Amino acid sequence: MSTVGEDLANEPHVLPDILLGTSSSKAVIKYVNSTKAPIGTIVFKGTTYGNRAPKLAAFSSRGPNLAGPDVIKPDITAPGVDILAAWPAETSPSTLESDKRRVSFNIVSGTSMSCPHVSGIAALIKSKHKDWSPAAIKSALMTTAYTIDNKGKPISDLKSHALATPFGIGSGHVDPIKASDPGLIYDITADDYISYLCSLKYNESQIALFEEGFIECKKEQLAMQPGDLNYPSFAVNFNRKARNVTITYKRTVTNVGIPKSTYKVSVEAPKGAYVIVRPKVLSFKKLNQKLSYKVSFIGLSRKKPVVNSAFGSLMWVSGNYRVKSPIAVTWK
């Protein structure tokens, strides 16, 4: 019986077995308890194809980001279930000492399998864009990710049995081809991250763990909104008792697509919030040109704790380019 929702990840058991998802397991248990002589039959129907994919694994880590609630986590999702992977010869496929089988490859599941996929794609992007920073590469991965599955429906979450949200899949599922040509990027420097840590009220000794030498937070850094970090996503936190509060963030994008291009904004506002973008059009004249915009989020009162978070998106569109950022609004 799966203890993590409907996930049916491959497991190299020593004895033959059948793995059932949570709902099927409950149905079997209910039947067994309903009769004194339960009967079970196994019918082999072969491999089935055409199921909805991808789906968010139930075991995958979830947000929100408790350490920095002004940044959505996770950033992105990637293949991580039933991945063919190299396996050490000293360890059995089941990891049991009593299991004497030895293999060179194994079928493995976990976020440790997703990470190599993203790392490999990041390396490919770096080979194509050698002057890009780590933040630029992350931006390309995030803003080109997709949230629609192979059946044309939103990606589902195997843990909640509902649609996956940015607190589960971040910006979406990684798309290597589109990530290599994102159109626009949100870049972040090391100094920007230092300012971000200062805005979170980290002291000098804590920041020194990230940056060599003495770092003293300046007044403007301490006054900075954590949400102004030039991240390719938006996390907004409202006081549940306050009404019509406005929070405004600033973002800067760099043109890495077509030299002369115009991008128009498209917003899907989270339920219970208004989103205003100024300007609504960004016109670039050359490559590597930077343009800035501001996003204002107006939150309505949420006195009744029915919905704690709502989600939407902000997308800059130009021709075939779709530079998309998730929005997560939370009432506390």
Image (cartoon, helix red, strand yellow):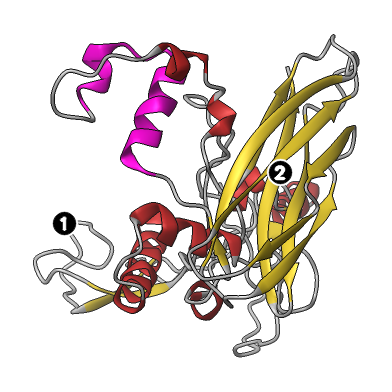
Residue at the image position 39 percent from the left and 24 percent from the top: 197
In the image, residue 24 lies at what x, y percent? 71, 59
> Front-most of 49 and 29?
49
> Front-most of 44 and 217?
217
Can residue 302 be seen in the rendering of this structure? yes
Magenta span has 206? yes
Can residue 36 be seen in the rendering of this structure? no
> Front-most of 60 and 168?
168
In the image, residue 158 lies at what x, y percent? 66, 55
Horizontally, residue 119 falls left or right of residue 183, namely left
Which of the image's four quarters has the C terminus?
Answer: top right
- What segment is highlighted magenta in the picture? 189-209
Three-letter amino acid code of the residue under disc 2: Ile
Three-letter amino acid code of the residue under disc 1: Glu
| Residue 298 lies in quadrant | top right
Q: Which residue is mark 2?
A: 327
Name the mark on residue 97.
1
Magenta span has 332? no
